[in-house]
Image (cartoon, helix red, strand yellow):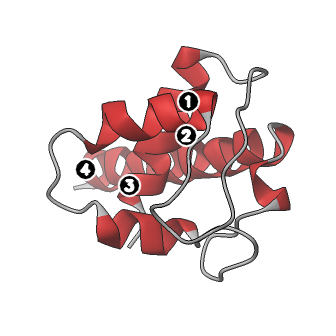
Amino acid sequence: MKTTLMIAASVMMLASGSAMANADLAKSKNCMSCHSVDAKILGPSFKDVAKKYAGDKAAEGKLAAKVIKGGSGVWGAIPMPANAQVSEAEAKTLVKWILSLK
């Protein structure tokens, strides 16, 4: 019983640490200049993105490419600029985190 509780607590700490690390990555790559987790700023909230792409099997790849290359027209007239400072691996990490938000 004690071992099960310790394992469960460790998994929860790792999961929350991972979520915080991804939020920190979003801050370090200036994503939070235009987005927030739960409110529209210039771009949509990350939770709105997660809702829009829920169930879309191709979303991770499409969105990771959009993070790096930029895009326009999906969320309104304001284009998302390219983010050359974000590597492909970082873009995938960010998108996985965003898509996990509910």
- Measured Cα–Cα span from mark 3 to mark 4: 29 Å
What residue appears at the point 61 percent right and 28 percent down from the top-left corner? 68
Q: In this view of the protein, which residue sits in the foreground, 2 or 37?
A: 37
- Measured Cα–Cα span from mark 2 to mark 1: 5 Å
Q: Tell me which amino acid carries mark 3.
A: Leu
| Residue 72 located left or right of residue 33 | left
**Which is nearer the N-term, disc 4 or disc 1?**
4
What residue appears at the point 79 percent right and 21 percent down from the top-left corner? 85
Q: Tell me which amino acid carries mark 2.
A: Leu
Q: Position of residue 71 (x, y in %)?
A: 56, 44
Q: Position of residue 20 (x, y in %)?
A: 66, 51
**Mark 2 burial class by Cα count in 10 Å: few <14, some 14-19, many 20+:** many
Q: Residue furthest bottom?
A: 39
Q: Report which residue position mark 1 lands on.
A: 91
What residue appears at the point 41 percent right and 42 percent down from the top-left corner? 96
- Measured Cα–Cα span from mark 3 to mark 2: 9 Å
**Mark 4 burial class by Cα count in 10 Å: few <14, some 14-19, many 20+:** few
Q: Tell me which amino acid carries mark 4.
A: Thr
Viewer-nearest of discs 2 and 4: 2
Quarter of the image where the N terminus is located: bottom left
Q: Are marks 4 and 1 in contact (CB under 8 Å)?
A: no
Q: Which secondary structure lies at badge 2?
A: helix
Q: Tell me which amino acid carries mark 1.
A: Ala
Q: Report which residue position mark 2 lands on.
A: 94
Q: Position of residue 8 (x, y in %)?
A: 33, 52
**Mark 1 burial class by Cα count in 10 Å: few <14, some 14-19, many 20+:** many
Q: In this view of the protein, which residue sits in the foreground, 70 or 89?
A: 70
- What is the number of the mark on residue 4? 4
Instruction: Name which quarter of the figure residue 34 lies in.
Output: bottom right
What residue appears at the point 60 percent right and 25 percent down from the top-left corner? 90
- What is the number of the mark on residue 99? 3
